[in-house]
Image: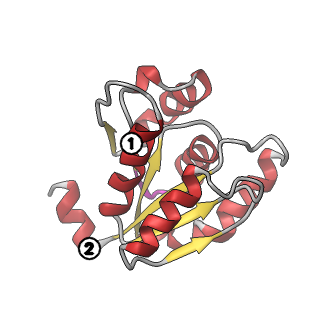
Amino acid sequence: MTTYDTELIMRAVAITGTRNTGHRSRGHYADLFHDYLGPFADDAHFYIGGARGIDSLSLLWLADDTAADITVVVPSTVDQQPADAREAITHCRERITEIVELGARELKTAAYHARNRWLVDRTSMTIGFPHQDEPTSGTWQTLTYAAEMGKPRLIVPV
């Protein structure tokens, strides 16, 4: 059975969120993930960007606290991700179902927006963890794109 076949059975959920997470403790994020990702974890396949912040924190939580399938998607290659994001991916490698490297030539805004659209296009809903002080962030761009596609969104401000 391929990943696509599995998606016909399981709910596919994109996770998006701020890279700026230093204003809260890791325990605070674990509680948020328990409350807002946990209810989907038994029958969902999570698609996560491979960046720092919410991407890495949610990856670590999902890998350690659930049996959910996990796909990590990066705009270029894993090697080009920040060190803390690479460490999270390495730590969780045995729990990651699939790593998708989109091969962008330059890591600029367009590459991240393409990754975000890729996530939304392949999932049935998006859960976003935006930082309230970043109204034009990639997180909001992703949530807006999901809305334009008519897909449900769950927004959990951090």
Residue found 84% across the figure and 48% down from its top: 24
Q: Is residue 42 magenta?
A: no
**Looking at the picture, which amino acid does disc 2 mark?**
Ile
**In which quadrant will I find the C terminus?**
bottom right
**Quadrant position of residue 46:** bottom left
Indicate how the structure is coloured in the image.
Answer: secondary structure
Relative depth, front residue between 82 and 141: 141
What residue does disc 2 label? 9
Disc 2 versus disc 1: nearer the observer: 1
Residue 57 as seen in the image, left or right of residue 67 = right
Vertical placement of residue 10 versus 121, above or below: below
* Residue 143 seen in render: yes
Relative depth, front residue between 38 and 147: 147
Q: Which residues are magenta?
A: 66-70
* Residue 39 seen in render: no
Distance CA(mark 2)–CA(mark 1)? 21 Å
**In which quadrant will I find the N terminus?**
bottom left
Which secondary structure is most common in the magenta stretch?
A: loop
**Quadrant position of residue 83:** top right
Question: How far from the left and from the top, in percent, is residue 26?
Answer: 77, 45
Q: How many marks?
A: 2
**Looking at the picture, which amino acid does disc 1 mark?**
Val
Question: How far from the left and from the top, in percent, is residue 59?
Answer: 54, 46
Vertical placement of residue 100 versus 158, above or below: above
What residue does disc 1 label? 73
Residue 9 as seen in the image, left or right of residue 156 = left
